[in-house]
Image (cartoon, grey):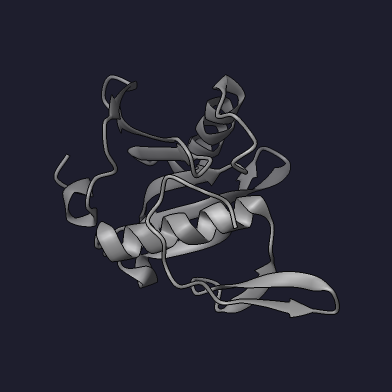
Amino acid sequence: MFELNLPETELNIRELKGKNYIFDPLRKQFVRFSPEEYVRQLFTAFLKEHKDYPQNRMANEIEIALGNVRRRCDTVVYDEFLQPLMIIEYKAPSVAVSQTTFDQICRYNMSLNVKWLIVSNGLKHYCCRIDPETQTYSFLSDVPKYGDLKLS
């Protein structure tokens, strides 16, 4: 596969009619393999296995409305009341994380209004916390454990 800045994990990849598919445990189905999908599967496994994020509190490809336009958040993490806590946006490893990427996830947050944003291309991960009172944000050096999301 690709050399990424994420712990390795067991992934279920299979070929069907000459195309590769990867199993997404959150959607409970095989989806077309792509570099971005590979990052998504490794990142969600990292959250579950190393940061104690419950699998049943994460969802992939969540549709949101931005005015008259429908968009999809790559991954949304929810609290115990199923209220959105975090949006995660993935890019392929060959795609540099840029201001455009942050603009995209910030637009998504206009709909969900979460306190946590993460952007990752599998090589670099950026996690920031938004202060809803001041509408400022601060970057963290590491992704917090799930239990720490509500404490901040």
Name the side, left or right, on which 152 lies relative to 132: left
Residue 30 horizontal/vertical position (percent):
65, 76
Whether residue 63 appears in this view of the structure is no
**Residue drawn at point x = 45 percent, y = 73 percent:** 10
**Residue drawn at point x = 73 percent, y = 70 percent:** 20
Name the side, left or right, on which 78 lies relative to 61: left
Whether residue 9 appears in this view of the structure is yes
Camera-side residue: 18 or 127?
18
Camera-side residue: 97 or 56?
97
Q: Is residue 33 shown above or below 130?
A: below
Residue 52 horizontal/vertical position (percent):
24, 62
Residue 4 horizontal/vertical position (percent):
48, 47
Outermost right residue: 17
Q: Is residue 15 shown above or below 127?
A: below
Name the side, left or right, on which 121 lies relative to 31: left
Picture quadrant where residue 83 is located: bottom left
Quadrant where the N terminus lies? bottom right
